[in-house]
Amino acid sequence: LLGMVQSAQVESGQGRLSKEHVDTSRYFALYLTAHPVEVLPLEGLGITGSLLGLEGLFSAAKVPSETGYIRIALRKDIHTGVSLSGLLRSKSGVKLDVGLHEILTGNHRLAVLLHMYQRLFLGGGVLYCSRDELLLAISLMDTVEIDQYTFQAGIYPLVYSPNKGQQKMRWYIHGEARFYKDLHLEVGYRSQGATSFAEMSVGYWFSESFLASIGYKHDTRDQGMYWLGIRLDI
């Protein structure tokens, strides 16, 4: 045993509305082994070991930093209503996906997702449909960022109804981009078993955390709905 090595790190995270600091310490033991020989050869001597890659041990795996958000939308069809959605994350990498009075469908959802790898999350949730049907589902979500573009895909491979048994698989794709610094565009498509719908919205960033948007959703039953909303990144 040559000794102990301590690696201390102080990480600072800057959110939209708050700051966070994390102090971590890791300890490593360094060993050296040798074997006696009668005659030390003068030829063929070379490096038999290396410390390359040791710095990788001192850096703990990090959960990619993502911004959570809360969105409030005023929807208009025959009646006027309010929809609330959000994607919140904790320091440990747990995500909470929430939706109340979803635009066009009126459904509700609540899912808890655990970090698996990079931006891949796995979890479970509850879906409550407007026709008074409760569904239990396993959820898988992944996110990819390329320059100013963000793409997200999710799938519910197992959906179960206590009254009707196993249901059709559900999935969605979503993309958003920021142009000319403050212009925002979102497009997406969501399959919900019996019906599916496409959506699009355009918006303007009034600050780094405040977005105002107007959007439209249209489903396979030829029903559509406009909405006006705000999004607060946290």
Image: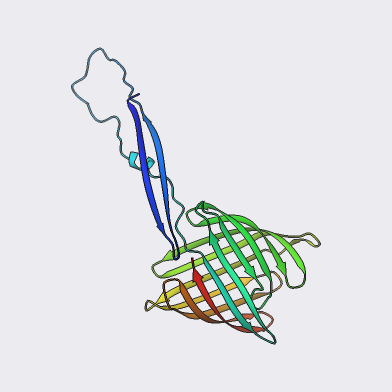
- Could you say where residue 123 lies in the image, as x and y percent from the top left? 61, 55
Q: Is residue 221 above or below residue 71?
A: below
Please report the residue visible at 56 percent of the width from the left and 58 percent of the height from the top. 95
Q: Is residue 186 above or below residue 234?
A: below
Q: Which of the 4 image quarters holds residue 31? A: top left
The image shows residue 67 at horizontal and vertical percentages of 47, 63
Relative side of 13 to 37, left or right: right
Q: Coloring scheme of the render?
A: rainbow
Extreme-top residue of the structure: 38
Which corner quadrant holds the N terminus?
A: top left
- Which residue appears farthest toward the left when viewing the image? 42
Decide: is 66 above or below 194.
Answer: above
User: Residue 183, position in %: x, y?
Assistant: 42, 79
Taking depth in this image into account, of 39 and 6 the one nearest to the observer is 6
Please tell me in which quadrant of the rendered image residue 41 appears. top left
Which residue does the image show at 25% across and 31% down from the upper left? 47
Tell me the residue at 44%/58% (across/down). 65
- List the single residue furthest toward the front: 18
* Left or right for 58, reference 103: left
| Residue 42 pos. (x, y %) | 18, 21
Residue at the bottom extreme, as displayed: 78
Position of 180 compared to 130: left or right? Answer: left
As rendered, which of 173 and 26 lies closer to the eye?
A: 26
Q: From this view, report whether residue 129 is shown above or below residue 3.
A: below
